[in-house]
Amino acid sequence: MAAAPAHYKKPDPCSFVIFGVTGDLAHRLVLPALYNLAAGDLLPDKFCVVGIARKAMSNDALRDSLMKGLREFATRTVDDAIAKRLLECVTCIAADPKDPASFDRMRGQLEKLEADRATGGHRLFYLATPPDAFAPIARELGRTGLLKEDGGAWRRLIVEKPFGTDLASAKALNNELLKIADEHQIYRIDHYLGKETVQNILVLRFANGMFEPIWNRNHIDHVQITVDEKLGVGHRGSFYDATGALRDMVPNHLFQLLSLVAMEPPARFDAHAVRSEKAEVLAAIQTQSEADALQNSVRGQYQGGKIGDTEIEDYRKTEDVRPDSTTETYAALKLTIDNWRWAGVPFYLRTGKALGVKRTEVAIKFKQAPFAMFRDTPVDRLSQNYLVISVEPTEGITLQFNTKVPGPVISIDGVEMKFRYKDYFKAEPSTGYETLIYDCMIGDNILFQRADSVEAGWQAVQPFLDAWKKAGASGLQTYRAGSEGPACSDELLRRDGRSWRKLG
Ligand code: BG6
Protein backbone atom coordinates (compact mmCIF):
# COMPACT_ATOMS: atom_id res chain seq x y z
CA MET A 1 0.00 0.00 0.00
CA ALA A 2 1.39 3.43 -0.92
CA ALA A 3 1.63 6.03 1.86
CA ALA A 4 -0.82 8.94 1.51
CA PRO A 5 0.85 12.22 0.46
CA ALA A 6 1.80 14.32 3.50
CA HIS A 7 -0.70 17.15 2.86
CA TYR A 8 -3.67 14.81 2.54
CA LYS A 9 -6.21 14.85 5.30
CA LYS A 10 -7.24 11.44 6.60
CA PRO A 11 -11.03 11.20 6.43
CA ASP A 12 -12.99 10.75 9.66
CA PRO A 13 -14.04 7.21 10.49
CA CYS A 14 -17.32 6.55 8.67
CA SER A 15 -19.69 4.08 7.13
CA PHE A 16 -20.07 4.19 3.38
CA VAL A 17 -23.57 3.03 2.51
CA ILE A 18 -24.19 2.12 -1.13
CA PHE A 19 -27.74 1.88 -2.43
CA GLY A 20 -27.78 -0.14 -5.65
CA VAL A 21 -24.73 -2.16 -4.60
CA THR A 22 -25.63 -5.03 -6.92
CA GLY A 23 -25.68 -2.72 -9.94
CA ASP A 24 -23.27 -1.78 -12.67
CA LEU A 25 -22.11 1.56 -11.25
CA ALA A 26 -21.14 0.08 -7.89
CA HIS A 27 -19.17 -2.72 -9.54
CA ARG A 28 -17.65 -0.73 -12.41
CA LEU A 29 -16.72 2.51 -10.67
CA VAL A 30 -17.49 2.84 -6.97
CA LEU A 31 -15.69 -0.27 -5.72
CA PRO A 32 -12.66 0.18 -8.01
CA ALA A 33 -12.43 3.79 -6.78
CA LEU A 34 -12.61 2.64 -3.14
CA TYR A 35 -9.93 0.10 -3.95
CA ASN A 36 -7.67 2.82 -5.39
CA LEU A 37 -8.26 4.95 -2.31
CA ALA A 38 -7.42 1.96 -0.09
CA ALA A 39 -4.25 1.36 -2.11
CA GLY A 40 -3.23 4.99 -1.56
CA ASP A 41 -4.00 4.78 2.19
CA LEU A 42 -6.74 7.38 1.76
CA LEU A 43 -9.61 5.57 3.44
CA PRO A 44 -10.43 6.19 7.10
CA ASP A 45 -8.79 3.85 9.60
CA LYS A 46 -12.18 2.88 10.96
CA PHE A 47 -14.40 2.23 8.02
CA CYS A 48 -17.23 0.03 6.84
CA VAL A 49 -18.95 -0.39 3.51
CA VAL A 50 -22.62 -1.26 3.72
CA GLY A 51 -24.20 -2.54 0.54
CA ILE A 52 -27.95 -2.09 0.44
CA ALA A 53 -29.73 -4.62 -1.76
CA ARG A 54 -33.47 -4.80 -2.23
CA LYS A 55 -33.44 -8.56 -1.59
CA ALA A 56 -31.47 -10.23 1.20
CA MET A 57 -28.05 -11.49 0.15
CA SER A 58 -25.22 -12.98 2.21
CA ASN A 59 -22.09 -10.95 2.90
CA ASP A 60 -20.04 -13.60 1.12
CA ALA A 61 -22.18 -13.49 -2.01
CA LEU A 62 -21.90 -9.70 -2.18
CA ARG A 63 -18.17 -9.75 -1.52
CA ASP A 64 -17.64 -12.35 -4.27
CA SER A 65 -19.62 -10.33 -6.73
CA LEU A 66 -17.74 -7.11 -5.88
CA MET A 67 -14.41 -8.93 -6.14
CA LYS A 68 -15.39 -10.16 -9.60
CA GLY A 69 -16.22 -6.58 -10.55
CA LEU A 70 -12.92 -5.39 -9.17
CA ARG A 71 -10.98 -7.94 -11.20
CA GLU A 72 -12.82 -6.84 -14.32
CA PHE A 73 -12.87 -3.07 -13.85
CA ALA A 74 -9.90 -2.15 -11.62
CA THR A 75 -7.74 0.52 -13.23
CA ARG A 76 -4.54 -1.00 -11.83
CA THR A 77 -3.26 -4.43 -10.90
CA VAL A 78 -5.26 -5.70 -7.94
CA ASP A 79 -3.20 -6.46 -4.84
CA ASP A 80 -5.09 -9.33 -3.22
CA ALA A 81 -4.20 -8.29 0.34
CA ILE A 82 -5.60 -4.77 -0.15
CA ALA A 83 -8.71 -6.08 -1.91
CA LYS A 84 -9.28 -8.63 0.86
CA ARG A 85 -8.98 -5.97 3.58
CA LEU A 86 -11.43 -3.74 1.72
CA LEU A 87 -13.95 -6.51 1.10
CA GLU A 88 -13.82 -7.58 4.74
CA CYS A 89 -15.32 -4.18 5.52
CA VAL A 90 -18.35 -4.98 3.32
CA THR A 91 -21.68 -5.96 4.89
CA CYS A 92 -24.90 -6.53 2.99
CA ILE A 93 -28.18 -5.23 4.40
CA ALA A 94 -31.56 -5.62 2.71
CA ALA A 95 -33.82 -2.58 2.42
CA ASP A 96 -36.43 -1.55 -0.09
CA PRO A 97 -38.02 1.91 -0.07
CA LYS A 98 -41.35 0.27 -0.94
CA ASP A 99 -41.19 -1.50 2.43
CA PRO A 100 -40.71 1.13 5.18
CA ALA A 101 -40.25 -1.56 7.84
CA SER A 102 -37.12 -2.71 6.02
CA PHE A 103 -35.62 0.78 6.47
CA ASP A 104 -36.42 0.69 10.19
CA ARG A 105 -34.63 -2.67 10.43
CA MET A 106 -31.75 -1.36 8.38
CA ARG A 107 -31.33 1.55 10.76
CA GLY A 108 -30.90 -0.83 13.69
CA GLN A 109 -28.42 -3.02 11.81
CA LEU A 110 -26.43 -0.01 10.65
CA GLU A 111 -26.22 1.48 14.12
CA LYS A 112 -25.00 -1.82 15.54
CA LEU A 113 -22.36 -2.10 12.84
CA GLU A 114 -21.28 1.47 13.44
CA ALA A 115 -20.85 0.78 17.12
CA ASP A 116 -18.84 -2.40 16.40
CA ARG A 117 -16.59 -0.60 13.92
CA ALA A 118 -16.33 2.58 16.04
CA THR A 119 -17.16 4.85 13.10
CA GLY A 120 -18.49 7.60 15.36
CA GLY A 121 -21.82 7.57 13.48
CA HIS A 122 -20.42 9.48 10.48
CA ARG A 123 -22.29 8.24 7.42
CA LEU A 124 -22.19 8.66 3.72
CA PHE A 125 -25.10 7.39 1.64
CA TYR A 126 -24.34 6.83 -2.03
CA LEU A 127 -27.36 6.60 -4.33
CA ALA A 128 -25.95 4.41 -7.10
CA THR A 129 -29.43 3.35 -8.20
CA PRO A 130 -31.55 4.16 -11.24
CA PRO A 131 -32.80 7.76 -10.91
CA ASP A 132 -36.43 6.85 -10.20
CA ALA A 133 -35.26 5.42 -6.86
CA PHE A 134 -33.54 8.65 -5.67
CA ALA A 135 -36.59 10.37 -4.19
CA PRO A 136 -38.19 7.25 -2.59
CA ILE A 137 -34.87 6.32 -0.91
CA ALA A 138 -34.29 9.91 0.20
CA ARG A 139 -37.79 10.04 1.71
CA GLU A 140 -37.13 6.88 3.73
CA LEU A 141 -33.74 8.20 4.86
CA GLY A 142 -35.55 11.32 6.01
CA ARG A 143 -38.35 9.45 7.76
CA THR A 144 -35.99 7.16 9.65
CA GLY A 145 -33.78 10.10 10.67
CA LEU A 146 -30.74 8.38 9.17
CA LEU A 147 -29.58 11.63 7.56
CA LYS A 148 -30.04 13.79 10.63
CA GLU A 149 -26.73 15.24 11.83
CA ASP A 150 -26.58 14.87 15.57
CA GLY A 151 -24.09 14.16 18.34
CA GLY A 152 -21.28 15.68 16.26
CA ALA A 153 -21.69 13.04 13.53
CA TRP A 154 -21.88 14.13 9.91
CA ARG A 155 -24.35 12.58 7.46
CA ARG A 156 -23.92 13.04 3.71
CA LEU A 157 -25.79 11.99 0.60
CA ILE A 158 -24.18 11.44 -2.80
CA VAL A 159 -26.65 11.63 -5.69
CA GLU A 160 -25.67 10.33 -9.09
CA LYS A 161 -26.64 11.72 -12.43
CA PRO A 162 -29.10 12.13 -14.13
CA PHE A 163 -30.39 14.78 -11.75
CA GLY A 164 -33.86 15.23 -13.21
CA THR A 165 -34.92 14.98 -16.82
CA ASP A 166 -35.92 18.61 -17.27
CA LEU A 167 -36.20 21.82 -15.27
CA ALA A 168 -39.42 20.85 -13.48
CA SER A 169 -38.20 17.40 -12.42
CA ALA A 170 -34.81 18.75 -11.29
CA LYS A 171 -36.59 21.34 -9.15
CA ALA A 172 -38.90 18.69 -7.73
CA LEU A 173 -35.94 16.45 -6.84
CA ASN A 174 -34.08 19.35 -5.23
CA ASN A 175 -37.19 20.13 -3.19
CA GLU A 176 -37.49 16.51 -2.04
CA LEU A 177 -33.85 16.36 -1.01
CA LEU A 178 -33.85 19.72 0.71
CA LYS A 179 -36.79 18.60 2.84
CA ILE A 180 -34.69 15.85 4.40
CA ALA A 181 -31.17 17.30 4.32
CA ASP A 182 -29.40 20.60 4.30
CA GLU A 183 -27.64 21.72 1.09
CA HIS A 184 -24.23 21.17 2.73
CA GLN A 185 -25.09 17.47 3.17
CA ILE A 186 -25.98 16.88 -0.50
CA TYR A 187 -23.24 15.92 -2.96
CA ARG A 188 -24.58 15.90 -6.55
CA ILE A 189 -21.98 14.07 -8.61
CA ASP A 190 -20.86 14.91 -12.11
CA HIS A 191 -17.99 12.60 -12.91
CA TYR A 192 -16.48 15.18 -15.29
CA LEU A 193 -15.39 17.10 -12.22
CA GLY A 194 -13.32 14.08 -11.18
CA LYS A 195 -11.17 14.45 -14.31
CA GLU A 196 -7.77 16.05 -13.73
CA THR A 197 -7.86 18.15 -16.89
CA VAL A 198 -11.29 19.50 -16.01
CA GLN A 199 -10.14 20.53 -12.54
CA ASN A 200 -7.06 22.02 -14.18
CA ILE A 201 -9.15 24.59 -16.06
CA LEU A 202 -9.39 26.61 -12.83
CA VAL A 203 -5.66 26.34 -12.22
CA LEU A 204 -4.82 27.28 -15.80
CA ARG A 205 -7.00 30.35 -15.61
CA PHE A 206 -6.38 31.54 -12.08
CA ALA A 207 -2.88 30.37 -11.15
CA ASN A 208 -1.35 32.06 -14.21
CA GLY A 209 -1.29 35.79 -14.79
CA MET A 210 -1.14 35.64 -18.56
CA PHE A 211 -4.48 34.18 -19.60
CA GLU A 212 -7.01 36.17 -17.60
CA PRO A 213 -6.28 39.58 -19.23
CA ILE A 214 -7.21 38.16 -22.64
CA TRP A 215 -10.00 35.85 -21.43
CA ASN A 216 -12.90 37.97 -22.63
CA ARG A 217 -14.87 39.30 -25.59
CA ASN A 218 -12.06 41.68 -26.62
CA HIS A 219 -9.73 38.83 -27.51
CA ILE A 220 -11.78 35.67 -27.76
CA ASP A 221 -13.78 35.11 -30.94
CA HIS A 222 -15.73 32.08 -29.75
CA VAL A 223 -15.49 28.88 -27.70
CA GLN A 224 -16.09 25.31 -28.91
CA ILE A 225 -16.87 22.50 -26.49
CA THR A 226 -16.76 19.02 -27.97
CA VAL A 227 -17.52 15.67 -26.36
CA ASP A 228 -17.47 13.15 -29.19
CA GLU A 229 -17.71 9.45 -28.48
CA LYS A 230 -17.04 6.43 -30.63
CA LEU A 231 -19.27 4.13 -28.63
CA GLY A 232 -22.82 3.60 -29.74
CA VAL A 233 -25.64 3.11 -27.27
CA GLY A 234 -24.82 -0.55 -26.61
CA HIS A 235 -27.05 -2.18 -24.01
CA ARG A 236 -28.39 1.12 -22.63
CA GLY A 237 -31.12 1.39 -25.26
CA SER A 238 -34.02 1.80 -22.90
CA PHE A 239 -32.35 4.52 -20.78
CA TYR A 240 -30.87 6.27 -23.78
CA ASP A 241 -33.97 6.28 -25.94
CA ALA A 242 -35.88 8.08 -23.19
CA THR A 243 -32.97 10.46 -22.64
CA GLY A 244 -31.08 11.44 -25.80
CA ALA A 245 -27.75 13.18 -26.25
CA LEU A 246 -28.88 16.59 -25.00
CA ARG A 247 -30.18 15.44 -21.60
CA ASP A 248 -27.47 12.81 -21.20
CA MET A 249 -24.52 15.15 -21.71
CA VAL A 250 -25.26 18.86 -21.99
CA PRO A 251 -26.78 20.24 -18.75
CA ASN A 252 -24.25 18.21 -16.80
CA HIS A 253 -20.90 17.34 -18.41
CA LEU A 254 -20.71 20.01 -21.12
CA PHE A 255 -22.01 22.69 -18.77
CA GLN A 256 -19.35 21.78 -16.22
CA LEU A 257 -16.75 22.51 -18.88
CA LEU A 258 -18.56 25.66 -19.94
CA SER A 259 -18.94 27.03 -16.42
CA LEU A 260 -15.27 26.48 -15.54
CA VAL A 261 -14.16 28.20 -18.73
CA ALA A 262 -16.62 31.08 -18.48
CA MET A 263 -16.99 31.80 -14.74
CA GLU A 264 -15.64 34.94 -13.10
CA PRO A 265 -12.61 34.53 -10.82
CA PRO A 266 -13.86 33.47 -7.39
CA ALA A 267 -12.60 35.50 -4.42
CA ARG A 268 -11.41 32.34 -2.67
CA PHE A 269 -10.82 28.73 -3.58
CA ASP A 270 -13.61 27.38 -1.44
CA ALA A 271 -16.86 25.63 -2.18
CA HIS A 272 -19.10 28.62 -1.59
CA ALA A 273 -17.12 31.06 -3.73
CA VAL A 274 -16.39 28.66 -6.61
CA ARG A 275 -19.88 27.20 -6.77
CA SER A 276 -21.48 30.64 -6.60
CA GLU A 277 -19.48 31.84 -9.62
CA LYS A 278 -20.32 28.68 -11.55
CA ALA A 279 -24.02 29.04 -10.79
CA GLU A 280 -23.86 32.71 -11.75
CA VAL A 281 -22.45 32.06 -15.21
CA LEU A 282 -24.87 29.21 -15.92
CA ALA A 283 -27.73 31.50 -14.97
CA ALA A 284 -26.33 34.05 -17.44
CA ILE A 285 -26.73 31.69 -20.42
CA GLN A 286 -29.40 33.33 -22.49
CA THR A 287 -32.72 31.49 -22.31
CA GLN A 288 -33.71 31.20 -25.95
CA SER A 289 -37.19 31.24 -27.42
CA GLU A 290 -38.20 27.89 -28.93
CA ALA A 291 -37.89 29.41 -32.41
CA ASP A 292 -34.33 30.56 -31.66
CA ALA A 293 -33.52 27.23 -30.10
CA LEU A 294 -34.46 25.50 -33.37
CA GLN A 295 -32.33 27.95 -35.34
CA ASN A 296 -29.40 27.54 -32.99
CA SER A 297 -29.24 23.78 -32.78
CA VAL A 298 -28.75 20.61 -34.75
CA ARG A 299 -29.83 17.16 -33.69
CA GLY A 300 -29.02 13.93 -35.42
CA GLN A 301 -29.38 10.19 -35.11
CA TYR A 302 -26.79 7.70 -36.30
CA GLN A 303 -27.35 5.14 -38.99
CA GLY A 304 -25.32 2.00 -39.49
CA GLY A 305 -21.66 2.34 -40.37
CA LYS A 306 -18.19 1.25 -39.45
CA ILE A 307 -15.93 2.56 -36.70
CA GLY A 308 -12.50 1.07 -37.22
CA ASP A 309 -13.23 -2.59 -37.82
CA THR A 310 -16.46 -2.59 -35.87
CA GLU A 311 -19.77 -2.59 -37.67
CA ILE A 312 -22.35 -0.43 -35.90
CA GLU A 313 -26.01 -0.99 -36.68
CA ASP A 314 -28.62 1.74 -37.06
CA TYR A 315 -29.50 3.38 -33.75
CA ARG A 316 -33.13 2.39 -34.36
CA LYS A 317 -32.15 -1.28 -34.49
CA THR A 318 -30.51 -1.15 -31.06
CA GLU A 319 -32.01 -3.41 -28.39
CA ASP A 320 -34.77 -1.56 -26.45
CA VAL A 321 -34.85 1.38 -28.86
CA ARG A 322 -38.15 2.16 -30.57
CA PRO A 323 -37.97 1.38 -34.32
CA ASP A 324 -39.42 4.82 -35.12
CA SER A 325 -37.45 6.63 -32.41
CA THR A 326 -36.75 10.33 -32.92
CA THR A 327 -34.29 10.45 -30.02
CA GLU A 328 -31.13 12.35 -30.91
CA THR A 329 -27.74 10.68 -30.56
CA TYR A 330 -25.99 13.89 -31.61
CA ALA A 331 -26.63 17.45 -30.46
CA ALA A 332 -24.97 20.72 -31.37
CA LEU A 333 -26.00 24.06 -29.85
CA LYS A 334 -25.04 27.68 -30.12
CA LEU A 335 -25.37 29.50 -26.80
CA THR A 336 -24.57 33.00 -25.67
CA ILE A 337 -23.79 34.28 -22.21
CA ASP A 338 -25.35 37.55 -21.20
CA ASN A 339 -22.65 39.30 -19.23
CA TRP A 340 -19.89 41.86 -19.84
CA ARG A 341 -17.13 39.33 -20.28
CA TRP A 342 -18.87 37.23 -22.92
CA ALA A 343 -21.32 39.54 -24.71
CA GLY A 344 -21.16 38.66 -28.41
CA VAL A 345 -18.95 35.56 -27.95
CA PRO A 346 -20.80 32.43 -29.05
CA PHE A 347 -20.26 29.14 -27.26
CA TYR A 348 -20.72 26.22 -29.66
CA LEU A 349 -21.33 22.86 -27.99
CA ARG A 350 -21.48 19.46 -29.66
CA THR A 351 -21.70 15.91 -28.46
CA GLY A 352 -22.58 12.64 -30.10
CA LYS A 353 -22.35 8.87 -30.06
CA ALA A 354 -20.94 6.53 -32.72
CA LEU A 355 -18.63 9.15 -34.20
CA GLY A 356 -15.35 8.42 -35.96
CA VAL A 357 -13.09 9.83 -33.24
CA LYS A 358 -13.30 9.95 -29.45
CA ARG A 359 -12.45 13.44 -28.33
CA THR A 360 -13.34 15.71 -25.43
CA GLU A 361 -11.95 19.20 -25.57
CA VAL A 362 -12.56 22.87 -25.05
CA ALA A 363 -11.14 25.00 -27.86
CA ILE A 364 -10.85 28.73 -27.28
CA LYS A 365 -10.52 30.55 -30.57
CA PHE A 366 -8.81 33.92 -30.32
CA LYS A 367 -9.50 36.81 -32.67
CA GLN A 368 -7.39 37.11 -35.79
CA ALA A 369 -4.50 39.54 -36.06
CA PRO A 370 -6.16 42.81 -37.05
CA PHE A 371 -4.47 43.60 -40.37
CA ALA A 372 -2.42 42.09 -43.17
CA MET A 373 1.14 43.13 -42.47
CA PHE A 374 2.61 40.18 -44.34
CA ARG A 375 1.93 40.91 -47.98
CA ASP A 376 1.86 37.33 -49.22
CA THR A 377 -0.22 35.97 -46.38
CA PRO A 378 -3.49 37.85 -45.93
CA VAL A 379 -4.93 37.78 -42.43
CA ASP A 380 -7.70 35.41 -43.42
CA ARG A 381 -5.18 32.84 -44.58
CA LEU A 382 -3.24 32.86 -41.32
CA SER A 383 -3.67 29.74 -39.25
CA GLN A 384 -6.17 30.16 -36.43
CA ASN A 385 -5.10 30.90 -32.85
CA TYR A 386 -6.61 28.26 -30.61
CA LEU A 387 -5.95 27.37 -27.02
CA VAL A 388 -7.16 23.79 -26.69
CA ILE A 389 -7.79 22.10 -23.37
CA SER A 390 -7.84 18.37 -24.15
CA VAL A 391 -9.62 16.09 -21.75
CA GLU A 392 -9.63 12.93 -23.85
CA PRO A 393 -8.03 10.89 -25.29
CA THR A 394 -4.87 12.90 -24.58
CA GLU A 395 -4.83 15.03 -21.48
CA GLY A 396 -3.10 18.32 -22.02
CA ILE A 397 -3.13 21.84 -23.39
CA THR A 398 -2.17 22.98 -26.87
CA LEU A 399 -1.59 26.47 -28.18
CA GLN A 400 -1.82 26.98 -31.93
CA PHE A 401 -0.08 29.99 -33.41
CA ASN A 402 1.60 31.21 -36.57
CA THR A 403 5.30 31.06 -37.18
CA LYS A 404 7.72 31.86 -39.97
CA VAL A 405 8.72 28.96 -42.15
CA PRO A 406 12.54 28.95 -42.39
CA GLY A 407 13.83 30.37 -45.70
CA PRO A 408 14.69 33.57 -47.50
CA VAL A 409 11.08 34.65 -48.13
CA ILE A 410 8.45 35.34 -45.50
CA SER A 411 6.16 32.39 -45.45
CA ILE A 412 3.89 31.68 -42.54
CA ASP A 413 2.51 28.43 -41.18
CA GLY A 414 0.54 27.32 -38.14
CA VAL A 415 2.34 25.33 -35.43
CA GLU A 416 1.45 23.91 -32.02
CA MET A 417 2.99 24.20 -28.57
CA LYS A 418 1.91 21.15 -26.62
CA PHE A 419 1.78 20.23 -22.95
CA ARG A 420 0.90 16.61 -22.23
CA TYR A 421 0.18 15.47 -18.70
CA LYS A 422 1.92 12.16 -19.23
CA ASP A 423 5.19 13.90 -20.17
CA TYR A 424 5.35 15.72 -16.83
CA PHE A 425 3.47 13.69 -14.28
CA LYS A 426 3.26 10.06 -13.46
CA ALA A 427 -0.18 9.22 -12.16
CA GLU A 428 -1.72 5.84 -11.52
CA PRO A 429 -4.72 5.31 -13.81
CA SER A 430 -7.92 6.00 -11.90
CA THR A 431 -11.66 5.76 -12.36
CA GLY A 432 -12.17 9.52 -11.90
CA TYR A 433 -14.35 8.83 -8.84
CA GLU A 434 -11.50 8.71 -6.28
CA THR A 435 -11.23 12.48 -5.78
CA LEU A 436 -14.99 12.84 -5.62
CA ILE A 437 -15.46 10.10 -3.01
CA TYR A 438 -12.46 11.28 -0.99
CA ASP A 439 -13.71 14.89 -1.07
CA CYS A 440 -17.11 13.78 0.12
CA MET A 441 -15.51 11.90 3.02
CA ILE A 442 -13.54 14.98 4.10
CA GLY A 443 -16.60 17.23 3.60
CA ASP A 444 -15.31 19.31 0.70
CA ASN A 445 -18.12 19.90 -1.79
CA ILE A 446 -16.26 22.21 -4.17
CA LEU A 447 -16.44 19.60 -6.96
CA PHE A 448 -20.13 18.86 -6.50
CA GLN A 449 -23.08 20.61 -8.03
CA ARG A 450 -25.22 22.92 -5.96
CA ALA A 451 -29.02 22.96 -6.39
CA ASP A 452 -29.05 26.37 -8.10
CA SER A 453 -26.48 25.45 -10.74
CA VAL A 454 -28.30 22.21 -11.62
CA GLU A 455 -31.48 24.22 -12.13
CA ALA A 456 -29.69 26.95 -14.10
CA GLY A 457 -28.33 24.23 -16.42
CA TRP A 458 -31.77 22.78 -17.07
CA GLN A 459 -33.20 26.27 -17.53
CA ALA A 460 -30.77 26.88 -20.39
CA VAL A 461 -31.51 23.59 -22.21
CA GLN A 462 -35.27 23.56 -21.59
CA PRO A 463 -36.19 25.55 -24.77
CA PHE A 464 -34.19 23.06 -26.86
CA LEU A 465 -35.97 20.11 -25.20
CA ASP A 466 -39.36 21.72 -25.78
CA ALA A 467 -38.67 22.78 -29.34
CA TRP A 468 -37.29 19.37 -30.32
CA LYS A 469 -40.18 17.54 -28.72
CA LYS A 470 -42.66 19.62 -30.71
CA ALA A 471 -40.68 19.21 -33.94
CA GLY A 472 -40.57 15.38 -33.58
CA ALA A 473 -39.11 13.77 -36.68
CA SER A 474 -39.01 17.06 -38.56
CA GLY A 475 -35.52 18.51 -38.48
CA LEU A 476 -33.92 15.34 -37.12
CA GLN A 477 -30.77 14.78 -39.20
CA THR A 478 -29.04 11.48 -39.79
CA TYR A 479 -25.34 10.67 -39.88
CA ARG A 480 -23.30 7.57 -40.58
CA ALA A 481 -21.73 5.84 -37.61
CA GLY A 482 -18.01 6.57 -37.87
CA SER A 483 -18.50 10.01 -39.44
CA GLU A 484 -18.08 13.46 -37.87
CA GLY A 485 -21.81 13.85 -37.27
CA PRO A 486 -24.58 15.46 -39.34
CA ALA A 487 -23.48 17.85 -42.09
CA CYS A 488 -25.85 20.52 -40.74
CA SER A 489 -23.65 20.83 -37.70
CA ASP A 490 -21.02 22.52 -39.90
CA GLU A 491 -23.69 24.84 -41.20
CA LEU A 492 -24.45 26.04 -37.65
CA LEU A 493 -20.98 27.63 -37.56
CA ARG A 494 -20.56 28.36 -41.27
CA ARG A 495 -23.41 30.84 -41.27
CA ASP A 496 -21.48 32.78 -38.59
CA GLY A 497 -18.32 32.63 -40.76
CA ARG A 498 -16.76 30.01 -38.47
CA SER A 499 -15.98 26.29 -38.53
CA TRP A 500 -15.49 23.45 -36.07
CA ARG A 501 -11.93 22.53 -35.26
CA LYS A 502 -11.15 19.46 -37.33
CA LEU A 503 -11.31 16.08 -35.61
CA GLY A 504 -7.70 15.03 -34.95
C1 BG6 B 1 -22.23 9.45 -18.96
C2 BG6 B 1 -23.27 9.30 -20.05
O1 BG6 B 1 -22.70 10.34 -17.97
O2 BG6 B 1 -21.04 9.98 -19.52
C3 BG6 B 1 -22.74 8.35 -21.11
O3 BG6 B 1 -24.47 8.78 -19.50
C4 BG6 B 1 -21.41 8.85 -21.64
O4 BG6 B 1 -23.68 8.24 -22.18
C5 BG6 B 1 -20.44 9.13 -20.50
O5 BG6 B 1 -20.89 7.84 -22.49
C6 BG6 B 1 -19.21 9.83 -21.02
O6 BG6 B 1 -18.25 9.89 -20.01
P1 BG6 B 1 -16.70 9.92 -20.38
O7 BG6 B 1 -16.03 10.08 -19.06
O8 BG6 B 1 -16.41 8.62 -21.06
O9 BG6 B 1 -16.51 11.09 -21.30
Image (cartoon, rainbow, N blue to C red):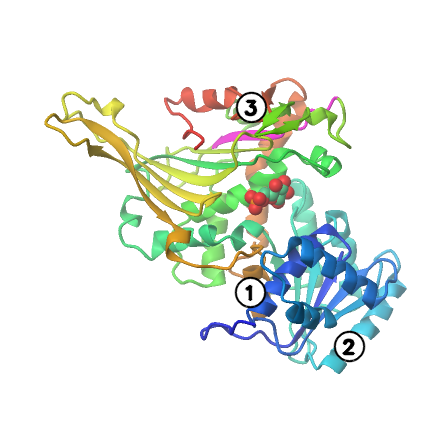
Ligand 1 lies under 8 Å from the Cβ of mark 2 = no
Q: Residue furthest top?
A: 474
Q: How many marks?
A: 3
Q: Earlier in the sequence, mark 2 or mark 3?
A: 2
Question: Reading the chain from its start, which is encountered first: label 1 or label 3?
Answer: 3
Residue drawn 36% across and 22% down? Answer: 497
User: x and y percent of residue 82 in the render?
Assistant: 64, 70
Q: Estimate the spatial distance between the alpha carbons at disc 2 and disc 3, rounded to whole Å.
A: 55 Å
Depth order, front residue of 235/428: 428
**Tag 2: amino acid:** Leu
User: In the image, which residues are magenta?
Assistant: 324-334
Which label sits in the foreground, 2 or 3?
2
The residue under label 1 is 439
Q: Quadrant of the C terminus?
A: top left
Which residue is tagged 2?
A: 113
Tell me the kind of residue under disc 1. Answer: Asp
Residue 330 magenta-highlighted:
yes
The CA distance from mark 1 to mark 3 is: 40 Å
**Residue 265 seen in render:** no
Image position of 284 with respect to 451: above or below: above
Residue at 58% from the left image edge and 21% from the top image edge: 479
Q: Is residue 16 visible?
A: yes
Q: Quadrant of residue 371?
A: top left
Q: Which residue is mark 3?
A: 294
> Is 202 within the magenta?
no
Q: Residue 273, image x and y in percent?
A: 45, 60
Quarter-wise, where is residue 238 in the image?
top right
Q: Is residue 49 above or below residue 290?
A: below
Query: Disc 2 and disc 1: Cα gap in Å?
Result: 24 Å
Question: In the rendered structure, which amino acid carries the disc numbered 3?
Answer: Leu
Q: Secondary structure at mark 1?
A: helix
